[in-house]
Image (cartoon, helix red, strand yellow):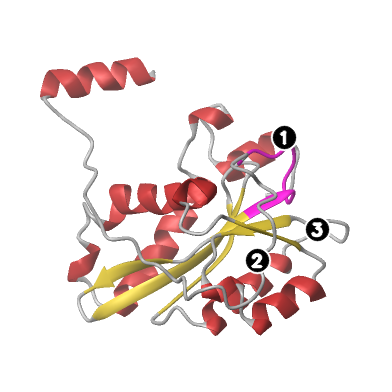
Amino acid sequence: VSEKVVRRIMAEEGLVAHVPKRRRYSSYEGETTPAPANLVDRDFTAERPNEKWLTDISEIKARDGKVYLSPMIDCFDGKIVAYTAGFSPNAELANRMLEKAASTLPGNARPLVHSDRGCHCRWPGWLGLMERFGLTRSMSAKGCSPDNAAAEGFFGRMKTEAVYPEKWEEHTRNEVLALVDEYIRWYNHERIKQSLGWMSPVQYRQSQGMAA
């Protein structure tokens, strides 16, 4: 059905989208290493897969602590290329995600990788991996959320669609890890997007004859 029909039915039933206030996790620890230029410049579009990637880290509350999610998002269609989730926002979480993402690349692909100024993208391990895989760095301006809005938008959708309504905070951290995996699989394979002709990222790539 069209968006107008959904809006009309919601208005008739007195339904509104739930957008809770939340305190955003911040990994900024100062200008520990020189920051590259903002090459994305708030243009979160791409003409082909593996041209422009975005990353960030977000925290999710659980009954017995917190879970941290580190995804790599392809600007071409919003597909989550790779992700890691764990109990600490440390170097291993970010570096393992980058290695997983790089392992999906065809031989000639060298995407631009954009992030905020979080410490996880400024540690020596991350910088070494970026150089090893031949990837180009791009960073947001200090304290400027709109510079990485597309990545933050993914976290917002996940929390509005699943984390808050399904009360993930009542689950254990291990249960939340399983819920994260379930959501990302659904997001990539089944969640339709208007910008993709009402297809999911995987469905869209398949329709275009691209590897999913």
Q: Is residue 175 left or right of residue 144?
A: left
- Magenta residues span 44-53
Count of numbered tags: 3
Q: Position of residue 161 (x, y in %)?
A: 31, 47
Sequence-earlier tag: 3 or 1: 3
Three-letter amino acid code of the residue under disc 3: Arg
Find the distance from the CA under tag 2 to the CA under tag 3.
20 Å
Contact between marks 3 and 1 (CB within 8 A): the answer is no
Residue 31 in the image, given as x and y percentages of width and height: 56, 73
Q: Nearer the viewer, mark 1 or mark 2?
A: 2
- 195 vs 40, left or right, is left
Q: In the rendered image, which residue does mark 3 sit on?
A: 110
Q: Secondary structure at mark 2?
A: loop
Up the image or down, 199 lies above or below 52; here it is above
Q: Which mark is residue 208?
A: 1
How far apart in space, not on screen, are marks 1 and 2 (Cα)?
36 Å
Residue at x 26% of width, y 70% of height: 61
Asked which secondary structure carries label 1, the reply is loop
Residue at x 15%, y 30% (from the top left corner): 15
Residue beneath disc 2: 35
